[in-house]
Amino acid sequence: MDIKITNIVEAILLGAGRPIRISEMRSILENDGISVELSDIKKSLNILEERYADTSLEIIDVASGYRIQIKNEHSASLSHLWNEKTPRISKALMETISIIAYKQPVTRGDIEDIRGVTVSTKTIRDLLERNWIKLSGYREVPGRPALYVTTKDFLNDLSLKNISELPDLPESIDNKDIDLLSKAV
């Protein structure tokens, strides 16, 4: 394997500031006059993974491609570099994004039925501004409510390649099998 290609792939990942697909890396290399196969780029990524094995960096494959990031065990050390507090994610926002992620595509009414409370416009707006959800169409029922799905940015932020990597939902308890009155007495 040509070390030059590996170093260029590393430079692309470091300089991009976003996940990069292998095909994008190939296009960048071809623009520089370097003809390379996709399998060679994948081998370069594997070499880089080995190179970073005992360092604070890692290469991960997320929904939008590959990226270099700092390993999670070092994240606490970095928090001191930034004075600004990251906005906290409210319980309502977490419940809403969870429902969208597991049940997509869903309407606002579907979310309200599952949560049992009204979904605020601010919650939907916050998810849209974070680019964690997007409008995917409209349900063909009276009123034509908007359908929401998660985005690649949502998956990237959670370091997931696809939605099937989300953890399984816990089994729900069937309330018909529980006689609450007898438990209370």
Image (cartoon, rainbow, N blue to C red):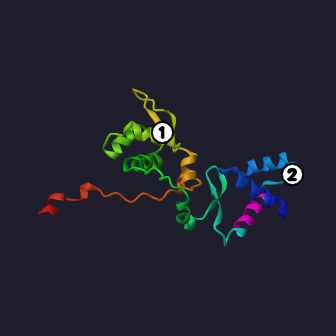
Residue shown at 53% from the left, 42% from the top = 131
Q: CA distance from mark 1 to mark 2?
A: 41 Å
Q: Nearer the viewer, residue 141 or 15?
A: 15
SS for tag 1?
strand
Query: What element does badge 2 sit on?
Result: loop
Does residue 151 sit above or below 143 in this rendering? below
Q: For the point 55% across and 66% down, which residue is it?
A: 77
Task: Measuring from the top left, give residue 169's x and y in whole percent.
Answer: 42, 57
115 displayed left or right of 155: left
> How many dots with numbers?
2
Give the residue type that dot 2 points to.
Ser
Residue 82 % position (x, y): 54, 56
Between residues 164 and 152, which one lies in front from this camera angle? Answer: 152
Q: Residue at x 37, y 51 (%)?
A: 91
Which quadrant of the rendered structure holds the C terminus?
bottom left
Residue bearing mark 2: 35
In this picture, residue 138 sits left or right of residue 162: left
Identified by mark 1, the residue type is Tyr
Instruction: In the rendered view, tell whether residue 44 sits above or below residue 20.
Output: below
Q: Sequence-wise, which precedes: disc 1 or disc 2?
A: 2
Tell me: residue 92, above or below residue 160.
above
Q: Quadrant of the N terminus?
A: bottom right
Residue 175 in magenta stretch: no
Which residues are drawn in magenta?
Answer: 41-49
